[in-house]
Amino acid sequence: MSKLITSIDEKTKSFIEAQQMFFVATAAADGKINLSPKGTDSFRIISPTQVAWLNLTGSGNETAAHILANNRMTIMMCAFDGKPNIMRIYGSAKAIYEQDEEWATYGPLFKANTGSRQIFLVDVQHIQHSCGMAVPLYDFVEHRDLLDIYHDKKGRQKVKAYWEEKNMTSLDGLPTGQKL
Protein backbone atom coordinates (compact mmCIF):
# COMPACT_ATOMS: atom_id res chain seq x y z
CA MET A 1 0.00 0.00 0.00
CA SER A 2 1.25 3.44 -0.81
CA LYS A 3 1.06 6.41 1.53
CA LEU A 4 0.76 9.99 0.28
CA ILE A 5 1.78 12.91 2.52
CA THR A 6 2.34 16.62 1.89
CA SER A 7 5.44 17.28 3.98
CA ILE A 8 8.55 15.59 5.34
CA ASP A 9 7.67 13.95 8.65
CA GLU A 10 10.20 12.42 11.05
CA LYS A 11 9.95 8.94 9.52
CA THR A 12 10.55 10.35 6.03
CA LYS A 13 13.40 12.54 7.29
CA SER A 14 15.11 9.50 8.84
CA PHE A 15 14.68 7.53 5.63
CA ILE A 16 16.15 10.35 3.50
CA GLU A 17 19.13 10.82 5.80
CA ALA A 18 19.97 7.10 5.59
CA GLN A 19 20.12 7.01 1.76
CA GLN A 20 23.39 7.03 -0.17
CA MET A 21 21.87 7.95 -3.54
CA PHE A 22 18.78 9.39 -5.14
CA PHE A 23 17.30 9.72 -8.60
CA VAL A 24 15.98 12.89 -10.25
CA ALA A 25 13.42 12.94 -13.09
CA THR A 26 12.40 15.95 -15.18
CA ALA A 27 10.79 16.58 -18.57
CA ALA A 28 9.87 19.48 -20.80
CA ALA A 29 6.51 19.39 -22.58
CA ASP A 30 8.13 17.61 -25.54
CA GLY A 31 11.34 15.72 -26.07
CA LYS A 32 13.30 13.38 -23.90
CA ILE A 33 12.56 12.58 -20.27
CA ASN A 34 15.66 12.85 -18.08
CA LEU A 35 16.32 10.46 -15.20
CA SER A 36 19.63 10.82 -13.37
CA PRO A 37 21.20 8.99 -10.42
CA LYS A 38 22.85 11.27 -7.86
CA GLY A 39 25.35 10.37 -5.16
CA THR A 40 27.84 11.97 -2.79
CA ASP A 41 26.70 14.15 0.07
CA SER A 42 24.53 16.37 -2.14
CA PHE A 43 20.99 16.34 -0.68
CA ARG A 44 19.59 18.57 2.06
CA ILE A 45 16.26 18.90 3.80
CA ILE A 46 15.61 22.64 4.16
CA SER A 47 12.21 22.38 5.87
CA PRO A 48 9.28 19.93 5.95
CA THR A 49 8.18 21.36 2.58
CA GLN A 50 11.48 22.15 0.88
CA VAL A 51 14.62 20.24 -0.14
CA ALA A 52 17.74 21.19 -2.08
CA TRP A 53 20.40 19.27 -3.91
CA LEU A 54 23.76 20.24 -5.33
CA ASN A 55 24.21 19.43 -9.01
CA LEU A 56 27.74 18.73 -10.17
CA THR A 57 29.06 19.33 -13.68
CA GLY A 58 28.39 16.42 -15.98
CA SER A 59 28.15 15.56 -19.62
CA GLY A 60 24.73 17.17 -19.99
CA ASN A 61 22.58 19.74 -18.24
CA GLU A 62 19.15 18.31 -19.00
CA THR A 63 17.68 18.99 -15.57
CA ALA A 64 18.35 22.72 -15.82
CA ALA A 65 16.81 22.91 -19.31
CA HIS A 66 13.72 21.02 -18.23
CA ILE A 67 13.22 23.16 -15.12
CA LEU A 68 13.31 26.31 -17.27
CA ALA A 69 10.67 24.83 -19.57
CA ASN A 70 8.56 23.10 -16.91
CA ASN A 71 9.49 23.30 -13.24
CA ARG A 72 8.19 19.85 -12.26
CA MET A 73 10.69 17.51 -10.61
CA THR A 74 10.40 14.06 -9.09
CA ILE A 75 13.07 12.82 -6.69
CA MET A 76 13.12 9.12 -5.85
CA MET A 77 14.99 7.27 -3.15
CA CYS A 78 14.66 3.56 -2.51
CA ALA A 79 15.89 1.30 0.24
CA PHE A 80 18.63 -1.02 -0.95
CA ASP A 81 19.03 -2.35 2.60
CA GLY A 82 16.76 -2.75 5.61
CA LYS A 83 13.00 -2.39 5.39
CA PRO A 84 11.72 -2.06 1.80
CA ASN A 85 10.58 1.43 0.81
CA ILE A 86 10.39 3.57 -2.30
CA MET A 87 9.91 7.27 -1.65
CA ARG A 88 9.10 9.86 -4.29
CA ILE A 89 9.11 13.60 -3.71
CA TYR A 90 6.94 15.43 -6.22
CA GLY A 91 7.56 19.14 -6.43
CA SER A 92 8.39 22.29 -8.30
CA ALA A 93 12.02 23.29 -8.64
CA LYS A 94 14.23 26.18 -9.56
CA ALA A 95 17.94 26.40 -10.26
CA ILE A 96 20.20 28.59 -8.14
CA TYR A 97 23.59 29.61 -9.55
CA GLU A 98 26.64 30.91 -7.69
CA GLN A 99 25.97 34.40 -9.12
CA ASP A 100 22.46 34.43 -7.57
CA GLU A 101 21.86 36.04 -4.18
CA GLU A 102 20.29 32.80 -2.91
CA TRP A 103 23.61 30.99 -3.36
CA ALA A 104 24.82 32.71 -0.18
CA THR A 105 22.00 30.96 1.69
CA TYR A 106 22.13 27.51 0.12
CA GLY A 107 25.73 27.12 -1.10
CA PRO A 108 27.22 26.84 2.43
CA LEU A 109 24.94 23.86 3.13
CA PHE A 110 27.18 21.77 0.87
CA LYS A 111 30.88 20.96 0.91
CA ALA A 112 32.78 23.18 -1.54
CA ASN A 113 33.23 21.37 -4.85
CA THR A 114 35.14 22.50 -7.96
CA GLY A 115 32.42 20.92 -10.12
CA SER A 116 29.44 22.66 -8.49
CA ARG A 117 27.12 23.77 -11.28
CA GLN A 118 23.86 24.73 -9.58
CA ILE A 119 21.66 23.98 -6.61
CA PHE A 120 18.11 22.88 -7.25
CA LEU A 121 15.64 24.13 -4.66
CA VAL A 122 12.50 22.00 -4.63
CA ASP A 123 9.18 22.98 -3.09
CA VAL A 124 7.56 19.72 -1.96
CA GLN A 125 3.99 19.18 -3.13
CA HIS A 126 3.56 15.50 -2.28
CA ILE A 127 5.62 12.62 -0.96
CA GLN A 128 4.66 9.08 -1.77
CA HIS A 129 5.96 6.01 0.05
CA SER A 130 5.38 2.64 -1.58
CA CYS A 131 6.40 -0.89 -0.71
CA GLY A 132 9.64 -1.50 -2.61
CA MET A 133 9.41 -5.21 -1.95
CA ALA A 134 10.91 -6.04 -5.36
CA VAL A 135 13.89 -3.67 -5.02
CA PRO A 136 17.03 -5.81 -4.65
CA LEU A 137 19.23 -5.69 -1.59
CA TYR A 138 22.67 -4.13 -2.08
CA ASP A 139 25.57 -3.38 0.23
CA PHE A 140 26.92 0.16 0.07
CA VAL A 141 30.71 0.15 -0.19
CA GLU A 142 31.62 3.81 -0.61
CA HIS A 143 30.99 6.91 -2.69
CA ARG A 144 33.16 7.26 -5.76
CA ASP A 145 35.45 10.29 -5.74
CA LEU A 146 36.36 10.12 -9.43
CA LEU A 147 34.21 13.10 -10.46
CA ASP A 148 35.67 15.28 -7.71
CA ILE A 149 39.21 14.27 -8.72
CA TYR A 150 38.41 15.02 -12.36
CA HIS A 151 37.00 18.48 -11.56
CA ASP A 152 39.84 19.36 -9.19
CA LYS A 153 42.39 18.37 -11.84
CA LYS A 154 40.66 20.57 -14.45
CA GLY A 155 40.20 23.54 -12.12
CA ARG A 156 37.23 25.87 -11.89
CA GLN A 157 38.03 27.91 -15.02
CA LYS A 158 38.24 24.81 -17.24
CA VAL A 159 35.04 23.46 -15.68
CA LYS A 160 33.31 26.71 -16.66
CA ALA A 161 34.77 26.45 -20.17
CA TYR A 162 33.26 22.96 -20.34
CA TRP A 163 29.85 24.44 -19.43
CA GLU A 164 30.16 26.87 -22.31
CA GLU A 165 31.02 24.06 -24.70
CA LYS A 166 28.68 21.29 -23.48
CA ASN A 167 26.11 22.57 -20.94
CA MET A 168 24.33 25.52 -22.58
CA THR A 169 21.63 23.50 -24.38
CA SER A 170 19.90 20.20 -23.74
CA LEU A 171 19.89 17.16 -26.00
CA ASP A 172 16.65 18.53 -27.45
CA GLY A 173 18.21 21.96 -28.08
CA LEU A 174 16.53 23.71 -25.13
CA PRO A 175 18.45 26.45 -23.31
CA THR A 176 19.70 25.39 -19.89
CA GLY A 177 20.03 28.86 -18.35
CA GLN A 178 23.57 27.97 -17.30
CA LYS A 179 25.38 31.04 -16.02
CA LEU A 180 29.10 31.35 -16.69
Image: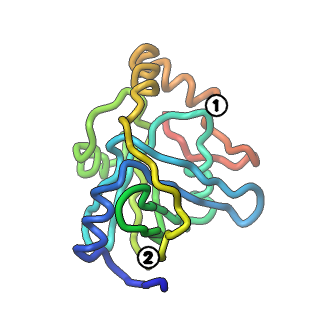
Q: Identify which residue, 23 or 137, lies in the foreground.
A: 137
**Residue at the image position 53 percent from the left and 64 percent from the top:** 73
**Crowd class of label 2 (few under 14; some 14 to 19; many from 20; radius 10 Å):** some
Q: Position of residue 158 (x, y in %)?
A: 49, 18
Asked whether residue 22 is in view, the answer is yes
Is 141 above or below relative to 4? above
Select label 1 or label 2 by which is in front: 2
Q: Position of residue 4 (x, y in %)?
A: 43, 84
Locate residue 69: give its quadrant: bottom right
**Crowd class of label 1 (few under 14; some 14 to 19; many from 20; radius 10 Å):** some
Q: Would you say 10 lies left or right of 67 here? A: left
Q: SS at mark 1?
A: helix
Circle nearer the N terminus (1, 2): 2
Tag 1–tag 2 contact (CB < 8 Å): no
Locate residue 77: give its quadrant: bottom left
Q: SS at mark 2?
A: strand
Q: Would you say 21 lies left or right of 106 here? A: right
Q: Position of residue 99 (x, y in %)?
A: 37, 40
**Residue at the image position 35 percent from the left and 61 percent from the top:** 82
Is 64 above or below relative to 5? above
The number of numbered badges drawn on the structure is 2
Residue picked out by circle 2: 129
Q: Identify which residue, 55 or 5, lies in the foreground.
A: 5
Residue picked out by circle 1: 166
Q: Would you say 96 lies left or right of 161 here? A: left
Could you tell me how far apart the alpha carbons at marks 1 and 2 are, in whole angstroms?
36 Å
Q: Position of residue 104 (x, y in %)?
A: 25, 46
Q: Identify which residue, 134 or 162, lies in the foreground.
A: 134
